[in-house]
Image: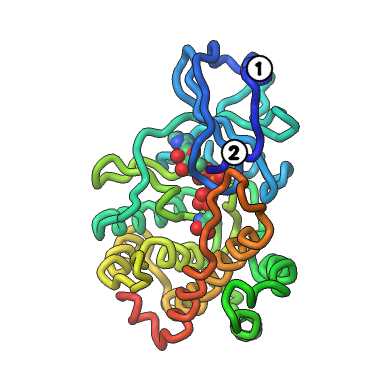
Amino acid sequence: MAVYTDVSEGELAAFLRNYAVGDLLSYKGIAEGSENSNYLLHTTSGAYILTLYEKRVERQDLPFFLGLMDHLARKGIVCPLPVHRRDGALVGELAGRAAALITFLEGMWMRRPTVAQCREVGRALAAMHIAGADFPLTRPNALQIDGWRKLWAGARDRADEVEPGLVAEVDRDFAELERNWPENLPSGIIHADLFPDNVFFLGEKLSGLIDFYFACNDFYAYDLATCLNAWCFEKDHSYNLTKSTALLAGYRSVRPLEQAEVEALPLLARGSALRFMLTRLYDWLTIPDGALVQKRDPLEFVRRLRFHRNIRSAAEYGF
Ligand SMILES: Nc1ncnc2c1ncn2[C@@H]1O[C@H](COP(=O)(O)OP(=O)(O)O)[C@@H](O)[C@H]1O
Ligand SMILES: N[C@@H](CCOP(=O)(O)O)C(=O)O
């Protein structure tokens, strides 16, 4: 459960008086997510999500994230709309945190996505890349190699407690990724965390994308590589080629890939696996036991790293 910050009914009611959303009827903490504190609210005008921004979200980045949702929604990407306060601002303050209200999206995320749903995700990712191309704000990816280094510095000393030999293994990955990371691939706005829990479906039909709080400017193909990691491995850690073939085909049906992007995919997928392994490892080692947060297993992404290390050509992903 991700509720790091408790909110009292009194302070929430006072916070909501800054918005034209009617009176508070009910609210409850949401038992999903891991980065921010989220509450589902019902007011006399409808349902909303209240987010209190926690450790990995910089306040100065909020205009980018919230503006991006607004931009994408106007371009036909179904995603939450930030609600303006009466004074026009999108961000307020609640319980000592920066906080925002966004609209509630119908649908549910898929714990076992189907092949058809993987194809839909590929299409939606490409549509998002195209829709974001004229978004005027930019944000560098804070979780690129330099950011990974900082996480590693905070976790390296204890990494071998989680898996013996992990320090040496990850040090080698860093060296190779730093040496070979591509420099010039098509880039623009990417979601950067399009995991199944951030994509809603109503049946087989994709009904919306959420959680733009890692969005940034980076290679489009890196976002695609993250989707391969997030959608195409089964619970037993096997790679589902049918799903990845569908996801890639869905993506390419909306935005064709350049040959350089295809060729870079194994390295990008490896980098993406390292990135998610590192945030998970860092949290695994630093979030106290008993906190109301579900810690995610870093070893799932150590296995993905090993898988991508053995890929010899992008064709093995299902092109
Ligand atoms: N706009 C929304 N509509 C409906 N549910 C939402 C919305 N935004 C978030 N949620 C719910 O809150 C959960 C956590 O949101 P998310 O943005 O993924 O949090 P975090 O950034 O902490 O990971 C989601 O899994 C979903 O259940
Ligand atoms: N997707 C990341 C964790 C980020 O959490 P989210 O709830 O914001 O998607 C992972 O799986 O490590």
Classify mark 1: residues with Cα within 10 Å, few (<14), some (14-19) or many (20+): some
Outermost residue toward the front?
Answer: 290
- Find residue 51 and report its horizontal and vertical position in percent: 59, 35
User: Residue at coordinates 52% horizontally, 58% vertically from top-left?
Assistant: 296
Going from N to C along the chain, the mark reached first, 1 or 2, is 2
- Find residue 109 and report its horizontal and vertical position in percent: 37, 46
Read off the residue under disc 1: 18
Say if disc 2 is inside 8 Å of ligand 1.
no
Classify mark 2: residues with Cα within 10 Å, few (<14), some (14-19) or many (20+): many
The residue lying toward the viewer, choosing from 166 and 119, is 166
The residue lying toward the viewer, choosing from 186 and 98, is 98
Read off the residue under disc 2: 3
Nearest to the eye among marks 1 and 2: give it. Answer: 2
Q: Which mark is residue 67?
A: none
- The reply to whether residue 296 is in sight is yes
Q: Secondary structure at mark 1?
A: loop
Instruction: Say if 92 sits above or below 115 in the image.
Output: above
User: Residue at coordinates 62% horizontally, 18% vertically from top-left?
Assistant: 9
Q: Quadrant of the C terminus?
A: bottom left
| 3D distance between C-alphas at marks 1 and 2 | 23 Å
- Find residue 188 and report its horizontal and vertical position in percent: 55, 58
- The reply to whether residue 73 is in sight is no
Instruction: Say if 273 sits above or below 139 in the image.
Output: below
The residue lying toward the viewer, choosing from 312 and 284, is 284
Q: Looking at numbered disc 1 in the image, what kind of residue is underneath it?
A: Asn
- Find residue 132 and report its horizontal and vertical position in percent: 51, 50
Say if disc 1 is inside 8 Å of ligand 1.
no
User: Residue at coordinates 31% horizontally, 55% vertically from top-left?
Assistant: 112
Q: Looking at numbered disc 2 in the image, what kind of residue is underneath it?
A: Val
Image quadrant of residue 265?
bottom left
Is residue 163 left or right of 205 when viewed as pictured? right
